[in-house]
Image: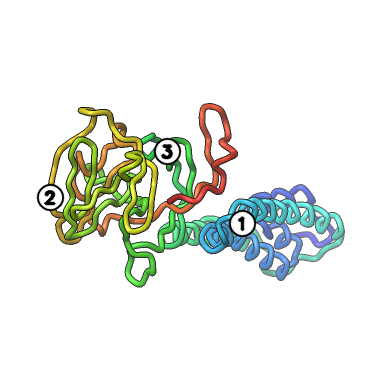
Amino acid sequence: MDPNKPRNPLTALAMSLVLPGFGQLYNGELNKAIWLFLVFAFLCIPGIALVALYLPDGLMMPALVLSLVATFSLWIYGMVDAWRGAKARPLYSPERWQVSGVYLLVVILCDIIALPMLTGYVRSHVVESFRIPSTSMEPGVMRGDILFADKRYNCPGCKGRIQRGDIAIFVYPNNRTLLYIKRIIALPGDRVALHDGAVSVNGKPLSLPTNPTVEMEDGRSWIVRPAAPGVANVTLAMTVPPGEVFVLGDNRAASVDSRAFGMVPMADVVGRARQVWLSLGPEGVRWGRLGKVLQ
């Protein structure tokens, strides 16, 4: 590279657009390039996971917005800084390592390997975002909700154990390429009975005597939409086999659940729905649901 040829600010800007810190690498600012990339990687992936799982519920949405603003601000800062750095080096002499092969290797390692691997690990083991396409869990979880699911759940060494009343994400038994969301009603060894829409576990009715739209179990309560008589109602009485759970949708008339496909292996339960971070309906953004904690 000709040391008397000035750096191209547009090239530096474009490189930082592709990858934060990449333009600084082009300008020879190796230390700044490394720190920009590391901070960006933390803010855009683990940082959002920390916001989703560890902050108090009331702080989740403000912290999420702040994290996204910080991520994009850092990205823009990197581009502007790379532009200015290139303009300030009209006679800049490149280092020996500043060759096209090194730049290509950086893109492969950071953009194609490191960031996807970090994203994949967080989604598989920490937290994942899901968009709800059906009404089967209304009114608690609505169609168009986009929620965080805690993936530190039902796994070796995880503190989150499956409990009655959890809103669980699991592999659909009849199509293992799909994930379903339902409420866990009964655990292995529990006796489940359904009759005319009423549900009982171990001989105890879930619905409150004074309000059939409210169910309660193990000190937790939730609202359901009971099916009309004869609609999506089945009568059954059974004991949940070892290693399996019984699941129902809260919207009993519009849910395909254990009444249709039977029990769900506990090994197929991959997460617990925790909090709504965005909700989109026909009317647009449902602002009142942003940050809603799912019970």
What's the residue at 20%, 56% (across, down)? 244
Q: Nearer the viewer, residue 93 or 187?
A: 187
Q: Secondary structure at mark 2?
A: strand
Q: Identify the residue position indicated by label 1 in the image.
A: 59
Q: From where the camera sits, is residue 208 visible?
A: yes
Pinpoint residue 60: horizontal percent, then vertical percent: 58, 55
Q: Amino acid at mark 3?
A: Pro
Separation (CA) of disc 3 from disc 1: 23 Å
Q: Identify the residue position indicated by label 3 in the image.
A: 139
Packing grade of label 3 (10 A; few <14, some 14-19, many >=20) is: some
Q: Secondary structure at mark 3?
A: loop
Q: Are marks 2 and 1 in contact (CB under 8 Å)?
A: no
Q: Which color scheme did the rendering employ for the protein?
A: rainbow
**In the image, farthest residue toward the front:** 210
Dot 3 or dot 1, earlier in sequence: 1
Q: Identify the residue position indicated by label 2 in the image.
A: 238
Pinpoint residue 277: horizontal percent, then vertical percent: 54, 47
What's the residue at 51%, 60% (across, down)? 53
Q: Secondary structure at mark 1?
A: helix
Q: Nearer the viewer, mark 2 or mark 1?
A: 2
Separation (CA) of disc 2 from disc 1: 43 Å
Q: Amino acid at mark 2?
A: Met
Packing grade of label 1 (10 A; few <14, some 14-19, many >=20) is: few
Pinpoint residue 91: horizontal percent, then vertical percent: 86, 61
Q: Is residue 286 left or right of residue 251?
A: right
Pinpoint residue 8: horizontal percent, then vertical percent: 79, 51
Dot 3 or dot 2, earlier in sequence: 3
What's the residue at 34%, 36% (across, down)? 251
Q: Is residue 279 left or right of residue 257?
A: right
